[in-house]
Image (cartoon, rainbow, N blue to C red):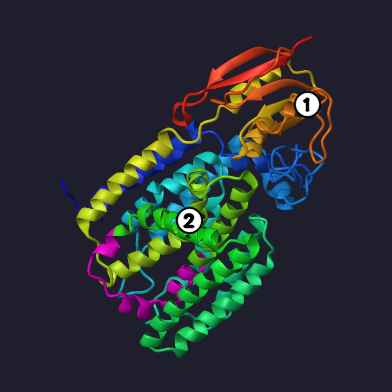
Amino acid sequence: MEFNLTGEKSSKYLLAFGILLLFCSVIISDLGLDSHVLMAVEDGALPWGHTRNIDPLASDQSYAPQYYERADVIYGMLDSEIKLKSFVFLSSLILIFVVGYYGFRKQDNDMGNEFDYFSASIIALYPAFIFATGRGYLEVPLALIFLLSHLNFLKNSRHGISSSYHIFILGGLGVGAIAWIKGITVLIGIAWLILLICIEYVSKKLDLNKKIQSMVILNVASIIAIVALLTLDHNSIGNSLLFSFAAMIDIFIFLAVGLCLIAIFTSKQNFKDCITENYSAMIIVNVVVLGCIYWIADLWLTEAKIWDTPGIKIFFILGNNGRYVTLIAPFLIILTSNFAKLKHLEMNSKIMTVNLCLILILSSLAGFHGQKMWTDEAADSIAESLVDGQDFLLIHEPDLAMHWLYTMHSELSDSHPNSVGHWRAPSSGFEAELNGQEIENRGNLSEVSFLVIQPGLDIEINDDWQLADSGKSPLIMGADEWLIYEKSM
């Protein structure tokens, strides 16, 4: 049964349901892996060793480069799960309000606004934001910073963007702040400011056909450059092409599917008018998407090499990295909303209904289930018997192993500040280390009193260790059994 999705009444229901899901995700979901890692940072470094080890099969707490200075500031203020989730949830509410307020600008009066309930509801129901809110990720605050610092670029060119440089400076400051939060050099903000000035200059100098040509040239040249850079860094043109394509698919899922924009590509469109109306905003979206393609592909290639994992498995393990492109999701929603109101874009209502039904399923899963852990139970079990100063060893396949190790840091750091968590891959030969052998670029296991075995891992433990506890991982993770062994006296 079809109904008017963009109508105010149905949009209000969708908006209310989206806010409910956001709230549920805060209450129900466990913190995400990255949140645990960043909250563990002490003086800019990770106390149990870096997440990317010199030895790909083992951790070493002495190898802890100070890459996380900004985490001391951010997570010094947001130093608990309640504070972190509350901050992200409040950011989500503000973002929904801003998108609704700026989603529809009256055509006859550029200063007049009506609240766009439909655009606001799409942001409220966005599975990526619901998931990020429950996990305590900062994607929502980052998207809010980007939107607020680039709102002026959403005004169509009939009214023009002011020539005042404060608009470009604001955009540069916004991107600089985002870069700092992500641990990237803030000089990117200066580069972005220069880029915005160049985009505006080109926008005023080119006619429509040249604007279209410039977008085509930008995309073709950028994709060639991305593949070339990835090939230089990772020495494989085949993998560079494969992972670049996979990153494009991932981004398409997060933007086109997640924001219910598939309907745009299946209806009659006037993309020429879209380019004429807001060339600057479309180039901004284009550049951010291209940047994310490189960022995600490079990350996947790096992890695939470290973990010695096939590409298809990396796509499923790290597919959530597509959330980085949500930086422009609110910006894109307002842009397409403005185009739709100006009759440049049309929505295929049947496809929109199907897309929205899919989103409701994904959003409900993210809101009513969210992230689930098994390591919290394992850490609680260890904490009951572990003496402060004794260590434990996590036996886990290399995929995200160090991230899972740090989820246990959150549970043990207060009660056992002098205990260290170690990680070894099943094929690392850790048995010899437990018997006293020391290996370069690996932490010393002489104080290890407990072994924690990853759910579903089939591994033999010798008679020097006795089974102390076990449990089931969450159903969504396979409901396999995790094991804890204690060293025999």
Give x and y (percent) for residue 154: 43, 71
Q: What residue type is labelled 2?
A: Thr
Question: Image check: 422 left or right of 256?
Answer: right
Give x and y (percent) for residue 263: 27, 59
Query: Residue at coordinates 73% horizontally, 47% vertically from top-left?
Result: 72
Question: Image check: 277 left or right of 198?
Answer: left
User: Residue pushed farthest top?
Assistant: 489
* Residue at numbered disc 1: 432
Along the line of sight, the residue nearer the viewer: 389 or 417:
389
Sort mark 1 into few (<14), some (14-19) or many (20+) by Cα contacts within 10 Å. few
Give x and y (percent) for residue 391: 77, 25
Task: Give the Cα separation between the discs numbered 2 and 1.
Answer: 46 Å
Q: Is residue 272 magenta?
A: yes
- Most frequent secondary structure within the magenta stretch: helix
Q: Is residue 367 above or below residue 137?
A: above
Q: What element carries label 1?
A: helix
The numbered dot on residue 313 is none
Give x and y (percent) for residue 173: 62, 67
Marks 2 and 1, the one that precedes in the sequence: 2
Q: In this view, does 137 lie above or below 216?
A: above
Question: Image check: 300 left or right of 334?
Answer: right
Splitting the image into 4 quarters, where does residue 295 fall?
bottom right
Which of the two discs, 2 and 1, sits closer to the camera? 1
Q: What stretch is highlighted in magenta?
A: 263-288
Q: Does the magenta stretch include residue 95?
A: no
Quadrant (top left, top right, bottom left, bottom right) of the N terminus: top left
* Residue at numbered disc 2: 326
Q: What residue type is labelled 1?
A: Ala
